Amino acid sequence: MTNAMGILWEVSFWEFFFVTILLGGGGAWMIGRSTALTWSGWGLLAFYVLLLAIAVRFIHFSLFHGTFLLPPTGFKTGLYYGVVDYIVLFAIAAAGRLYVRGLQMSRQYGFLDQQSA
């Protein structure tokens, strides 16, 4: 498999879509959901997404011959695509958190949604 590096993907679009968006995005959505349900802060969400981004980068490395943080010759490339993965996963986790938090707030404070007569 030849590398067809893009701004967002390292090997191919479909590999990025499957690993980062589908697999990692599902995990990120659940991270956002869990931090909303437990009323945890954004810092814990950021930490969990960091761990997930490292795992996603490892899947790219081990299954699709992408780069990881080692060896040192591929550090810059691995770090760049790791940051890209982190940003994408953080956006999905934030969307999941805001969605669940919105449901919680509308259920708890339903009177705020009512129109005044």
Image: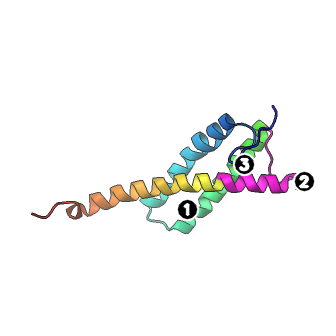
Q: Amino acid at mark 2?
A: Thr
User: Which residue is denoted by mark 2 in the rendering?
Assistant: 73
Residue 66 makes an appearance in the image: yes
Q: Which residues are magenta?
A: 65-85
User: Which residue is denoted by mark 1 in the rendering?
Assistant: 45
The answer to whether residue 77 is left or right of residue 34 is: right
| Residue at the (56%, 68%) spot, across then down | 43
For residue 72: magenta?
yes
Q: Amino acid at mark 3?
A: Arg
User: Which residue is denoted by mark 3 in the rendering?
Assistant: 57
Q: Earlier in the sequence, mark 3 or mark 1?
A: 1
> Relative to 92, does residue 111 appear above or below in the rendering?
below
Circle 1 Cα neighbour tier, 10 Å, few/some/many (<14 / 14–19 / ≥20): many
The answer to whether residue 68 is left or right of residue 117 is: right
The quarter of the picture where the C terminus appears is bottom left
State the SS at label 2: helix
State the SS at label 3: helix
Q: Are marks 2 and 1 in contact (CB under 8 Å)?
A: no
Q: Amino acid at mark 1?
A: Leu
Task: Please state which of residues 17 and 68 is positioned toward the viewer in this rendering.
Answer: 17
State the SS at label 1: helix
| Residue at the (66%, 56%) spot, across then down | 51
